[in-house]
Amino acid sequence: MFTEDTIAAIATAPGVGGVGIIRVSGAKAFPLVDALFAGKSAVPLTERPNRSIQYGRIVDPKTGRTVDEVLLLLMKGPHSYTAEDVIEIQCHGGPVVVRELLRLVLSSGARLAEPGEFTKRAFLNGRIDLTQAEAVIDIIEANGEAALGVAVGQLDGTLATWIRRLREELLTMVARLEVTIDYPEEDIEEVTTAEVAASLTPIMADMQHLLATAKSGRMVREGITTAIVGRPNAGKSSLMNALLRENRAIVTDIPGTTRDTIEEGMTIEGISLRLIDTAGIRDTEDIVEKLGVERAKEYVSAADIVICVIDGSTALSEEEKDILETLKGRTAVVFINKADIATAITAEDIAPYGPFAAVAAISAANGEGLDVLGHVVKELVYGGEVQGDRGAMLSNIRHINLMETALALLTQAKENLEAGLSVDFIVTDMRSAWETLGDITGDSLRESMVDELFSRFCLGK
Ligand code: GDP
Ligand code: ZN
């Protein structure tokens, strides 16, 4: 154990709930809670069965007053979340009760935990690696089933296991190269460098492969930015409402909603979408409309998917043709709207402006045809690049950046090897790559990075 402190925090969300949970972790967790606990049996908590649930009351030792009826969940280290002795006190879920219990636990010797400190301890005690700790944050923050799936996959340590194997191979190569520095015989060096260059190739291919999952991983994790464009009255707002009616995200806390646009979150095929309606801005005077067109173009270039709504009740206007032109090279879905009342435009009229990910006649009014969007989303996320066949998917920007850096270092090392440069240079680059990969798992422990990372957690986690 790296510390003697026993820490405590409220583990449940603030507010009223069915149950509230206080989590206590550390060497003194059991005696400390025992001093407040009154149950039927007089057997000390330390001697009760591990992983059992104990019923009783928490009593304020100063006043003798019962604060609440509780269930204690006993988990002895190292087989607990933090790898230390842990007790979870389950009480009634009122905010006053929970706070009062926490106050008692603190006054009997525990220290209030910092945000993420339980998970940090799990990491520092060697129970989980950094990618697993980050997976815990991702699970908490998951915006849809797909993001949850990636996070849970990361929690099992697949990514870390793979990276550790990679690091071992690199270290073996570094060792072999270093031998040639000590014994600088020409032919040995030549053979070794050729061998190392050859064994770098599959490693770098694996890294590239994993990096190729990053775009999908990012979209799954952060949500797909989806811009809805189209001329005034095409039915953009109606479409947005129709999509949200079926799929509104549970969490719609999206920063960045501006006066000019409306942003909403929705989930489709388990994947989160940030829908941006470029409405409002275009419905008034000419000058504002021009600004709107410019603005719409900005959104188009920043979006992962563009949904272009065409008014299907009248022939294509010049403005609509312009908008269709701006979609070149984008993942775009063209919805010919108002299919319930008109068919003035067909998919054939749109096709020449393509190719588009999909063209479909829809009705924002009755919801007809909208399911096409789900197919496009799935294709975009899972279609092109297969998910890592190791089951690992890079979704975390920190991991992606480090992986890119490590790959760049190895690319340089390989080039230098092939150019016959001094082995010292090559060894330096390979060592840096090895360190950089270790930053992903937390194996090359850099304290500032670890602190920064765990401060992102909520209290009690
Ligand atoms: P926006 O300016 O692009 O946001 O368009 P709105 O969503 O405000 O819709 C403009 C008008 O078209 C409104 O009167 C809507 O009721 C109507 N509208 C939108 N979608 C449909 C549809 O699918 N069918 C019909 N019949 N009317 C629609
Ligand atoms: Zn509108």
Image: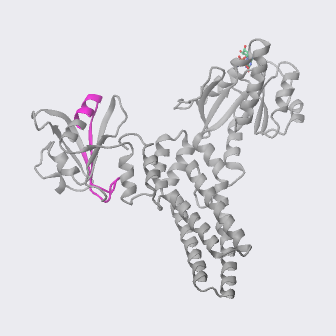
**Which residue lies most toward the top here?**
285
In magenta stretch: residue 82: yes
Judge whether 185 appears above or below 391 on screen. below
Q: Is residue 439 magenta?
A: no
Quarter of the image for residue 239 reads top right
Nearer the observer, 253 or 37: 253
Measuring 18% from the left and 47% from the top, which residue is drawn there? 32
Residue 94 appears in the figure: no
Seen from the viewer's position, the closer of residues 276 and 257 is 257
Residue 94: image x %, image y %? 29, 29
| Residue 355, picture quadrant | top right
Quadrant where the N terminus is found in the figure: bottom left
Number of labels in the image equals 0
Residue 51, image x, y percentages: 27, 54
Q: Report the quarter where the C terminus lies.
A: top left
Q: Residue at x 45, y 51 (%)?
A: 448
In x, y percent, where is residue 58? 17, 38
Going 61% across and 82% down the picture, which residue do you hit? 180
Q: How is the image coloured?
A: one colour
**At 66% from the left edge and 21% from the top edge, which residue is drawn?**
260
User: Image check: 367 left or right of 132?
Assistant: right
Up-down relation of residue 102 to residue 402 (above or below): above
Q: Which residues are magenta?
A: 72-101
Vertical position of residue 352 compared to residue 295: above or below = below
Q: Quadrant of residue 405?
A: bottom right
Q: Is residue 118 left or right of residue 63?
A: right
From the top left corner, tell me how far across and down residue 340 is, in percent: 76, 21
